[in-house]
Amino acid sequence: MSSHSSEQVFGRIPLPAAAKKRLVQLLGPKGYLDRPEDMSLYEYDGSVDKARPEMVVFPRTTEDVSAIVKITAEYGVPIVGRGAGTGLSGGAIPRAGGVTIGFSRMNRILEIDLENERMVVQPGVVNLDISLAVAALNYFYAPDPSSQRACTIGGNVSENAGGPHTLAYGVTTNHVMGLEFVLPDGSVHTTGGKELDSPGYDLVGLLTGSEGTMVLVTKVIVRLMRQPEKIKTILAIYNSASDCADTIADITARAITPVAVEMLDGEMLRMVEEATHAGYPLDAAAVLLIELEGLVEAVEAQTLQIREACERCGAREFRVAKTAEERDLLWKGRKNAFGAVGRVSPSYYVQDGVVPRTQIAPTLRHIAEVAKKHRLGISNIFHAGDGNMHPIILFNPHVEGELERAKAAGEDILTYCISVGGSITGEHGVGMEKNELMAKLFSPDSLDYIGRFKTLFDPAGRLNPGKVLPTGRGCLEIRQAPLRAGAPLL
């Protein structure tokens, strides 16, 4: 979303002609891209940085991935896996150049096993397609990022993606049962399976959320769930954002866990309503979008308690969607929110901090102060139920200094999240956007242990270099292992 490039701050490794020739021979004329105009399409994701690969390759099988990895290993070429490019932390950006492995052609559903409530998929399968494949059989896949119509399961596994409905169901790691993956030496391995739990170390848990820095995932076994008996979607409308935020703690105190609790502030809901006409009030200061699922009797009882909580905290109106169409329209507004911002601002910078639920209202006040400090507009839309904040910082990349101010505002917000007992990411990942902030969240010893895991799997530092761990620009000078052209695997 901007012209900013990371190439100036992270060394690039050239792709030797011999390596490129062998990759072309392996994949054929339609299995790769290397023209500059094509590379420009793979130099960015949904974040604000850019870096261009030397070549993009498109495997169709695990064997293709293994062969690609072996060839690049011989020449010490860095490799970056890429799903749909919808990530928001620079995870798929090739900071060191090299080869981007696009998984868009590994997009097959390999097995549907409803008896065990499992599905086996390739990494390029689109998130929503998993649910669509079993919807008629009354099953679904729970993790639902806002980009679920485009994002892929491989990218979801890499980033441990979440979504509005993971408040009750959990994030990606809670629904991945097994993985097939390729190590940086090209060897193929599996971990986990269809069973509920496997003996030994939880490698599935370790690799889910490792952001492509340890392995390349080539197959995923996911958990399917039965569709609930009853779904009820609620819109609570407020004249005060603080009152809206306070409602979340009140709901929690009643021992109710909705499947989703989303909050939109006034600025954001107006952008959403003008773009989608979902039925959000244009004059409100904030709204809560709440969804309940379960047995009919339980949902009805919880609706009454939530109405009481909302009204006690000052909600001016409490709406319950009367039809499936009305429910779908409310969610359309929420899930198309980022696109709606484009009608107002030429670009924006999405943050992903997490705070305890009791700190949501103070955090919103701090975000407002940050907006004034950096002279930028900031709107808020977030997973309020688990305190996963998504302040959207509006800026114009063509105005000198605005991108830098947007980044500074983002750092101020995330630093505050840490200070109140939170974290720098809830679902978007660390990537290259927040890796220098890791030194504010973790001690040097903890970062060292994280680095040891990275080195154990990827001793030459070829897999997605320059991500997750600080590269040396951070205050604690925790450095990743340097990458050298032609460096073989250790």
Image (tube, grey):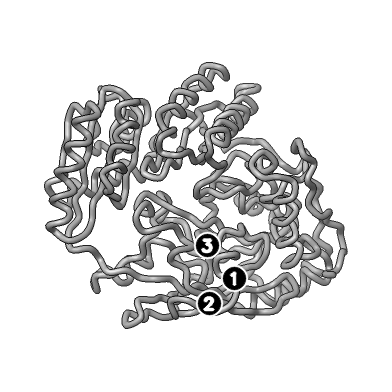
Camera-near label (1 vs 3) is: 1
Name the image quarter holding the C terminus: bottom right
Q: Relative to residue 410, is residue 296 depicted above or below?
A: below
Q: Report how many numbered discs are placed on residues in the image.
A: 3
x 71%, y 62%: residue: 453
Q: Nearer the viewer, residue 264 or 63?
A: 264
How packed mark 2 is, by other alpha carbons closer than 10 Å (few <14, some 14-19, many 20 or more), is many
x 18%, y 43%: residue: 305
Camera-near label (2 vs 3) is: 2
Mark number, residue 192: 2
Q: Amino acid at mark 3?
A: Val
How packed mark 3 is, by other alpha carbons closer than 10 Å (few <14, some 14-19, many 20 or more), is many
- For residue 268, say whether it is visible: yes
Residue identified by numbered label 3: 157
Mark number, residue 63: none
Q: Position of residue 19 (x, y in %)?
A: 80, 69
Residue identified by numbered label 1: 203
Q: Amino acid at mark 1?
A: Leu
Q: Position of residue 124 (x, y in %)?
A: 50, 66
* For the residues bearing labels 2 and 1, Cβ distance under 8 angstroms: yes
Describe the element under mark 3 as helix, strand or loop: helix
Q: Earlier in the sequence, mark 2 or mark 3?
A: 3
* For the residues bearing labels 1 and 3, Cβ distance under 8 angstroms: no
User: Relative to residue 14, is residue 351 drawn left or right?
Assistant: left
Q: CA distance from mark 2 to mark 1?
A: 8 Å
Location of residue 196 (image quadrant): bottom left
Q: CA distance from mark 2 to mark 3?
A: 14 Å
